[in-house]
Image (cartoon, rainbow, N blue to C red):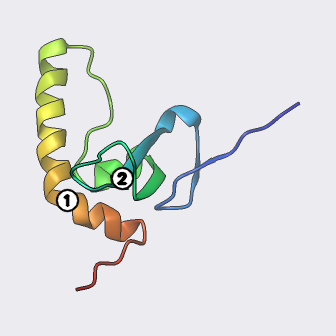
């Protein structure tokens, strides 16, 4: 018997596989977007996403889901640096 454990990279809690969202951030030169310079892939649970204002559940209604996707995109763009800081990324000049 094999048991898999899924851990949120932010809160470090064990969650079910369906409770995780994978965020992949990569850095590349604008001229060569296919060759990644740096890449960071993290798993974030639904609860951590909710704390940041991202809705990670389907409603079953297409129109509502599209509205949620637009809201999530705006929220993610506004909170992008907060997400990176939660994942341990430091910005220096």
**Residue beneath disc 1:** 79
Q: Return the x and y of residue 16 as percentages of the image width and height.
A: 58, 38
State which quadrant residue 29 falls in. Answer: bottom left
| N-terminal label among 2 and 1 | 2
Q: Residue at the far bottom: name it.
A: 93
Asked if residue 11 is positioned above or below residue 16 in the image, the reply reads below
In this picture, residue 16 sits left or right of residue 49: right
Q: Return the x and y of residue 10 as percentages of the image width and height.
A: 46, 61
Q: Return the x and y of residue 68 as percentages of the image width and height.
A: 16, 31
**Residue beneath disc 2:** 25
Query: Residue, x 24% and y 65% (percent of image)?
Result: 81
Give the number of the mark in front: 2 or 1. 2
Residue 59 vs residue 30, the one in the foreground: 30
Q: Residue at the far right: name it.
A: 1
SS class, disc 2: strand
Label 2, label 1: how far apart the Cα atoms are: 14 Å
């Amino acid at each position: 018997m094999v048991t898999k454990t899924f851990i949120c990279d932010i809160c470090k809690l064990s969650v079910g596989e369906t409770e995780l969202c994978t965020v992949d951030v990569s850095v590349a030169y604008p001229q060569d977007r296919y060759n990644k310079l740096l890449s960071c892939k993290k798993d974030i649970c639904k609860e951590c996403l909710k704390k940041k204002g991202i809705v990670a559940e389907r409603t079953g209604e297409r129109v509502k889901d599209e509205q949620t996707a637009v809201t999530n995109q705006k929220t993610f763009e506004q909170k992008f640096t907060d997400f990176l800081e939660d994942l341990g990324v430091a910005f220096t000049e």
